[in-house]
Image (spheres, helix red, strand yellow):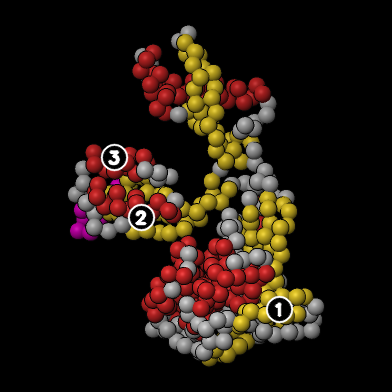
């Protein structure tokens, strides 16, 4: 599995992250095209920071103040040249920043530094670069923070900036204080790292390093390289706990649909490729009872399944929560020879593994139901006997492996 590891040992800013990803092999043409949707062509150069060669990205954009709605419109206007997954990531990055700003300042009308063209271009470039690398997961090493105070649009503020601290806190990213005076990690850099992070470093196990990249900041101190490092690594998968995955969540509320139609819709969605589907009883406005219909699916299935939900349920709106990270166990289907009432049959069993060790064995319901009907005993007894036989087989072999 390909994993991207960020090492912000001298903090992080948006342009530095773009540079590090380009240095790791991200598609330069796609990144430049995406950034040019907001600014003129960025200047990308190779520089040296305290003896380390790194990539410096300069947007050369002027400062501008915008609302979150303005920023989102700028992103939507660039949709033709940005991969949909990267665009969704960029929107979530600015939502993280907006949430942090509102937590600190209350409801406000404008972004300041983070709403400028350079920040928008950096976020678009970083998300496009991340997407182009084909990464399956990402981890972030401790983020180094500066010391002292700095001056911004809200006046003098302590370092780390309040928005930066809020973003890092909400994401649960590890941090450490550096010795250097000044802002090392910006709100944009913190939000990008928070968005990219999907696994903890402790989950990596052993790995090989496929690529290393360095993104440079503007300053060039003598004693410490002003860079962020990114590494593309490949894990064996055997040492990891749960595998990362990304899904979309579709939701709608209904209060005028029968149970039969809800069950039919869930069945149809599963048949069309949904990963999971459920109906949750809720209390809606004016005290009306209803159901929350939730479908989990791959991103490329979202539009088709949303249309199916609308047509089957008659609902006028489907909420989509895009690119939600989840962790899944390794799963396979095995077969076990089972004897019940003197009859023998090979029955399928769903096997769940963590680090190659079996921790879950579940009999497949449909086949168990059919056999239970044939031999005239309760299906729950058939399920229990299949699973008991499966566990005995595992213990007998002594491997506990899911192969």
Pick whichever of labels 3 and 1 is earlier in the sequence.
Answer: 1
How far apart, in angstroms, are the residues tagged by discs 3 and 2?
20 Å
The residue located at (46%, 58%) in the rendering is: 323
Asked if the stretch drawn in magenta spans residue 100, the answer is no
Q: Which residue is mark 2?
A: 303
Quarter-of-image position of residue 355? top right
Relative vertical location of residue 204 with respect to residue 69 in this rendering, above or below: above
Pick whichever of labels 2 and 1 is earlier in the sequence.
Answer: 1
The residue located at (34%, 51%) in the rendering is: 304
Task: Determine whether the residue tagged by mark 1 lies in a helix, strand or loop.
Answer: strand
Give yes or no for contact between labels 3 and 2 (Cβ–Cβ under 8 Å).
Answer: no
Q: Which residue is mark 1?
A: 46
Tell me the mark number nearer the camera, choosing from 3 and 2: 2
Q: Position of residue 87 (x, y in %)?
A: 46, 67
Q: Locate residue 219 relative to residue 291 in the image: left or right.
A: right
The residue stretch that appears in magenta: 281-290
Q: Residue furthest front?
A: 29
Q: Position of residue 190 (x, y in %)?
A: 57, 72
Q: Residues within 10 Å of mark 1 (few under 14, many from 20)?
A: few
The residue located at (57%, 41%) in the rendering is: 330
Per the rendering, the mark at residue 263 is: 3
Pick whichever of labels 3 and 2 is earlier in the sequence.
Answer: 3
How far apart, in angstroms, are the residues tagged by discs 3 and 1?
59 Å
Relative vertical location of residue 120 with respect to residue 205 in this rendering, above or below: below
Task: Determine whether the residue tagged by mark 3 lies in a helix, strand or loop.
Answer: helix
């Amino acid at each position: 599995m390909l994993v991207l590891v960020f090492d912000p040992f001298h903090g992080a800013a948006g342009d530095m992250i773009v540079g590090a990803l380009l240095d790791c092999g991200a598609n330069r043409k796609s990144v430049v095209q995406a950034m040019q949707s907001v600014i003129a062509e960025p200047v990308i150069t190779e520089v040296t920071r305290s003896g380390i060669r790194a990539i410096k990205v300069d947007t050369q954009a002027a400062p501008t103040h915008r609302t979150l709605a303005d920023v989102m419109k700028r992103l939507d206007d660039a949709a033709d040249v940005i991969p949909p997954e990267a665009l969704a990531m960029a929107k979530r990055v600015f939502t993280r920043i907006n949430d942090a700003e509102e937590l600190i300042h209350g409801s406000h009308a404008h972004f300041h530094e983070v709403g400028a063209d350079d920040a928008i271009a950096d976020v678009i470039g970083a998300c496009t670069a991340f997407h182009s690398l084909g990464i399956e997961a990402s981890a972030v090493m401790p983020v180094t923070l500066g010391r002292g105070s700095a001056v911004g649009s809200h006046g003098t503020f302590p370092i780390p900036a309040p928005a930066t601290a809020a973003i890092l806190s909400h994401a649960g990213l590890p941090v450490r204080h550096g010795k250097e005076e000044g802002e090392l990690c910006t709100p944009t850099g913190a939000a990008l790292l928070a968005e990219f992070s999907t696994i903890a470093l402790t989950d990596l196990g052993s790995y090989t390093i496929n690529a290393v990249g360095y993104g440079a900041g503007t300053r060039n101190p003598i004693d410490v390289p002003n860079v962020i490092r990114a590494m593309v690594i490949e894990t064996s998968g055997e040492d990891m706990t749960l595998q990362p995955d990304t899904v979309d969540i579709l939701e709608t509320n209904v209060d005028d649909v029968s149970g039969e139609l809800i069950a039919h819709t869930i069945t149809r969605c599963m048949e069309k490729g949904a990963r999971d589907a459920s109906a949750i009883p809720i209390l809606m406005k004016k005290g009306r009872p209803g159901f929350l219909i939730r479908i989990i699916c791959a991103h490329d299935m979202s539009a088709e399944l949303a249309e199916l939900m609308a047509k089957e349920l008659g609902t006028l709106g489907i909420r989509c929560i895009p690119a939600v990270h989840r962790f899944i166990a390794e799963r396979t289907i095995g077969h076990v020879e089972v004897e019940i009432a003197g009859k023998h049959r090979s029955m399928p069993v769903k096997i769940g593994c963590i680090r190659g060790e079996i921790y879950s064995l579940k009999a497949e319901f449909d086949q168990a139901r059919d056999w239970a009907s044939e031999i005239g005993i309760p299906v729950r007894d058939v399920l229990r006997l299949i699973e008991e036989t499966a566990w005995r087989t595992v213990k007998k072999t002594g491997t506990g492996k899911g192969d």
